[in-house]
């Protein structure tokens, strides 16, 4: 897409490095001092808290800790603290311009150049085939955070070049040498990084995310014109390969949190290419680019809640400035309104620590974002390629019922075994939910991934038959997926039998999810199934954030945010039990609090063919 349109005369389109000026440098005081006083004061205050900052040590034994224990956090916490501190100090110095923060910035640059590797231990797949606890320093791997580190240093070099050169004539050459050895050279030399899409076609957010950081490094630091051109062209090719495998409906199967480094990183790449070509490289007119952007507000439920299929938390805080600018670029006012609303809701002046590529545009290129806005809260969403639907009672309001569901297969990026999963919200609050994902460990990305309960179909809103849950793999998928929508109702139907192994004994399992609008709105979940042989081992699991209460003989009460919803089921056929899930994972607790509840509706008798209907009604 990019290379087809622009690669043939990229040498003519690309602005030379010495003329490349994407943002004001710290020496251009007028631009920085013209920024809103609130933003400047907040940035300087944040920097002042880091004066005299002691960058935490990263010894080899801490790096090896992941290999030995599987714990990611013990190394990653100080690793990211270093980068967050440098990011904060750089912006503080740009805002103030008095040199107060320079020594601490020098210490940060020095500390990162001292690090033996910028690759996270969890991404250290290169060293001895992933069997060594320390990275191979003679053959650097370019992972997400090596790229992020290089980009942070490249922006530091660009913004504060004059000031840092005045501290020492050796510092900036050291910075350039390390970025060249760790990022620029291996990116040009190697074609076997899987995220490049040359040796692998199973791509995800790594491709645009790594490409965006490599682009920053080449555009800002590469002094050789031919190498700079080659690096930009190769990054464009990476983005093109990623786009070639993306669904036409723009759906992100990794979920809205990963959209920030998938579709969001695509926008980063496109903005870099535009600025580096004087606005001549632009592909926002392509339908796929527009659909990728629109996914985010299509996945928005209410407030900070988003569709949390796959490894995605239910609460997401997107980079407001990025969302706003992407919406403006594609002419989608709904997406721009979501970005403006998020900006006002969270006071976002800085997109996220460690990424100046998001911070700088949020200061200089978000004109109009301060105007009051409301998220679009779309009434109906249907992504036919991703097989995701969402519907609410009325557009523009989170009052009443919201229903979402997915089909798909069980080899999606950051996959959970969840084909057929559905969510129900009421008045913008979660009722029947997807737990999301806990804190990443070595187990999360290992053959033991599906031993983790949040990945299993039994802890999604799905059936378990003859003790068999859904299996992982592209062959385990929903089939015969249909979607119908009109003013009165929305209906999503699919056969789940193909998502289960043979031992489940499923001939068919037709699930139909309905949202009925009107005077008596409700959600209906209909399960019509046929088994190869009779069994009494059939159960429906429902995960809820509301502590269930036994109501009438055929119903459970779900008291959510002061509203008691009624979950009706055929009590003559199904027996209800309730399990309390005490959450001991900090990531899950940050979204859901201390506990969740799992409702299990189990068959009372042997059954082979049946139709069960669950109905959720409001107060």
Image: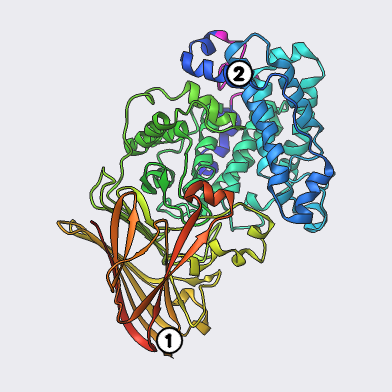
Q: Quadrant of residue 83?
A: top right
Per the image, label 2 sits on a secondary structure element best described as helix
Q: Secondary structure at mark 1?
A: loop
Q: Position of residue 447 (x, y in %)?
A: 66, 66
Q: Position of residue 76 (x, y in %)?
A: 69, 42
Q: Is residue 570 magenta?
A: no
Residue under the image location 56 percent in, 69 percent down: 473
Which of these two is toward me, 444 or 271? Answer: 444
Magenta segment boundaries in residue numbering: 15-29
Q: According to the image, label 1 marks what residue?
A: 536
Q: Position of residue 231 (x, y in %)?
A: 66, 37
Q: Which residue is mark 2?
A: 92
Q: Is residue 218 visible?
A: no
How far, Cα to Cα, is label 1 from label 2? 66 Å
Question: Residue 166 shows which numbered tag?
Answer: none
Instruction: Estimate the x, y position of residue 223 in percent, counting from the top left.
Output: 72, 25
Magenta-drawn stretch contains 26? yes
Residue sitting nearer the eye, 271 or 315: 315
Is tag 1's residue or tag 2's residue first in the polypeptide sequence? Answer: 2
Q: Main secondary structure of the magenta part?
A: loop
User: Which of the image's four quarters has the C terminus?
Assistant: bottom left
What residue is at 52 percent from the left and 31 percent from the top? 351
> Is the residue marked by circle 1 packed among few (<14), some (14-19), or many (20+) residues within 10 Å?
some
Would you place residue 65 above or below residue 23 in this image? below
Residue 479 falls in image quadrant: bottom left
Q: Residue at position x 72%, y 24% from top?
A: 53
Q: Nearer the viewer, mark 1 or mark 2?
A: 1
């Amino acid at each position: 897409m990019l290379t087809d349109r622009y690669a043939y005369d990229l040498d003519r389109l690309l602005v030379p490095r010495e003329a490349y000026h994407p943002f004001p440098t710290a020496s251009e005081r007028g631009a920085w001092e013209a920024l809103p006083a609130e933003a400047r004061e907040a940035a300087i205050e944040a920097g002042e808290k880091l004066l005299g900052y002691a960058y935490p040590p990263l010894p080899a034994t801490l790096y090896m800790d992941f290999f030995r224990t599987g714990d990611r956090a013990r190394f990653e916490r100080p690793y990211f603290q270093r980068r967050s501190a440098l990011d904060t100090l750089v912006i503080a110095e740009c805002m103030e311009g008095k040199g107060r923060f320079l020594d601490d910035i020098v210490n940060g640059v020095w500390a990162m150049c001292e690090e033996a590797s910028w690759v996270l231990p969890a991404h250290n797949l290169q060293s001895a085939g992933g069997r060594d606890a320390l990275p191979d320093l003679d053959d650097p791997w370019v992972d997400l955070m090596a790229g992020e580190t290089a980009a942070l240093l490249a922006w530091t070099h660009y913004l504060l070049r004059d000031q840092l050169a005045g501290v020492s004539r050796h510092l900036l050459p050291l910075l350039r040498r390390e970025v060249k050895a760790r990022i620029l050279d291996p990116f040009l030399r190697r074609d076997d990084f899987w995220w490049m899409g040359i040796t692998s076609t199973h791509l995800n957010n790594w491709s645009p995310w790594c490409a965006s950081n490599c682009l920053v490094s080449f555009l800002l630091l590469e002094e050789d014109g031919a190498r700079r051109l080659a690096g930009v062209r190769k990054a464009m090719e990476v983005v093109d390969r990623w786009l070639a495998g993306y669904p036409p409906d723009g759906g992100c199967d990794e979920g809205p949190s990963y959209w920030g480094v998938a579709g969001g990183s695509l926008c980063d790449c496109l903005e870099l290419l535009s600025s580096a070509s004087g606005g001549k490289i632009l592909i926002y007119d392509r339908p796929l680019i527009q659909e990728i952007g629109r996914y985010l507000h299509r996945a928005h439920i209410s407030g900070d809640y988003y569709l949390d299929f796959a490894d995605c938390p239910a609460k997401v805080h997107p980079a407001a400035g990025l969302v706003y600018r992407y919406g403006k670029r594609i002419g989608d006012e709904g997406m721009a309104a979501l970005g403006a609303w998020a900006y006002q809701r969270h006071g976002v002046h800085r997109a996220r620590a460690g990424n100046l590529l998001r911070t700088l545009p949020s200061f200089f290129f978000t004109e109009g974002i301060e105007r009051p806005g409301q998220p679009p809260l779309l009434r109906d969403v249907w992504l036919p390629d991703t097989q995701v639907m969402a519907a609410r009672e009325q557009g523009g309001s989170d009052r009443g019922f919201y229903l979402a569901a997915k089909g798909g297969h069980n080899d999606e990026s950051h996959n959970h075994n969840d084909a057929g999963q559905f969510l129900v919200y009421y008045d913008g609050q979660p009722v029947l939910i997807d737990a999301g994902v806990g804190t990443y460990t070595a187990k999360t990305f290992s053959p033991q991934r599906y031993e983790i309960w949040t990945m299993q179909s039994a802890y999604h809103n799905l059936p378990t038959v003859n003790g068999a849950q859904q299996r992982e793999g592209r062959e385990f998928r929903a089939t015969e997926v249909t979607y119908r929508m009109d003013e009165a109702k929305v209906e999503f139907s699919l056969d789940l039998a193909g998502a289960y192994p043979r031992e489940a004994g499923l001939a068919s399992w037709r699930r139909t999810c309905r949202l009925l609008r009107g005077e008596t709105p409700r959600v209906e979940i209909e399960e019509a199934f046929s088994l190869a042989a009779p069994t009494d081992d059939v159960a429906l699991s429902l995960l809820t954030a509301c502590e269930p209460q036994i109501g009438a003989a055929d119903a459970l009460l779900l008291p959510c945010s002061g509203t008691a919803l009624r979950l009706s089921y055929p009590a003559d056929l199904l027996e209800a039990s309730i399990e309390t899930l005490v959450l001991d994972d900090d990531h899950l607790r940050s979204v859901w609090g201390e506990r969740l509840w799992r409702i299990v509706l189990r068959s009372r008798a042997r059954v082979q063919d049946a139709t069960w209907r669950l109905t959720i009604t409001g107060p």
